[in-house]
């Protein structure tokens, strides 16, 4: 049954207001607002914490340039 699918970092069923991760390859896809620290869906593109971290890690070598601190 589709109602028994689990989502979110909490790995529970869909309930309440949820937000979809804009990464088409996101494993969890949908997240409860409270679980990701939101009170309302943000405007524009939103990435879940896991996808945002993966994108950041993929775009950096691990070193921080002085320009990154501005």
Image (cartoon, helix red, strand yellow):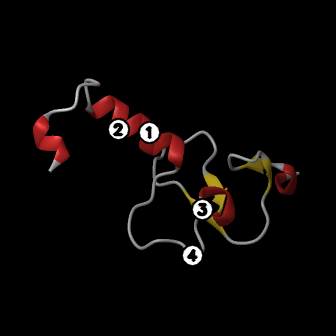
Q: Residues within 10 Å of mark 3 (few under 14, many from 20)?
A: few
Residue at label 2? 56
- Residue 60 appears left or right of 10: left
Question: Which comes sooner in the sequence, label 3 or label 1?
Answer: 3
Residue denoted by label 1: 53
Looking at the picture, how far across and down is residue 27, in whole percent?
Answer: 60, 39
Residue bearing mark 4: 40
Q: Secondary structure at mark 1?
A: helix
Number of the front mark, 3 or 2:
3
* Residue at 57 percent of width and 75 percent of height: 40
Counting residues from the start of the chain, the first of labels 2 and 4 encountered is 4
Q: Which residue is mark 3?
A: 37
Query: Residue 36 lies in what quarter of the image?
Result: bottom right
Camera-side residue of 47 and 5: 47
Q: Earlier in the sequence, mark 1 or mark 4?
A: 4
**Mark earlier in primary sequence (3, 2):** 3
Q: Residues within 10 Å of mark 1 (few under 14, many from 20)?
A: few
CA–CA distance in space, label 3 to label 1: 16 Å
Q: Position of residue 19 (x, y in %)?
A: 59, 64
State the separation of the CA atoms marked 4 and 3.
Answer: 9 Å
**Mark 4 crowd level (few <14, some 14–19, many ≥20, 10 Å Cα):** few
Give the residue displayed 39% in from the left and 62% down from the top: 45
CB atoms of marks 4 and 3 within 8 Å: no
In contact (CB < 8 Å): disc 1 and disc 2: yes
């Amino acid at each position: 049954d589709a109602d028994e699918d689990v989502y979110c970092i909490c790995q529970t069923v869909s309930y309440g207001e949820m937000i979809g991760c804009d990464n088409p390859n996101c494993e969890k896809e949908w997240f409860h607002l409270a679980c990701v620290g939101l009170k309302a869906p943000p405007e524009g593109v939103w990435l879940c914490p896991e996808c945002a971290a993966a994108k950041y890690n993929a775009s950096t070598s691990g070193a921080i340039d002085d320009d990154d601190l501005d």
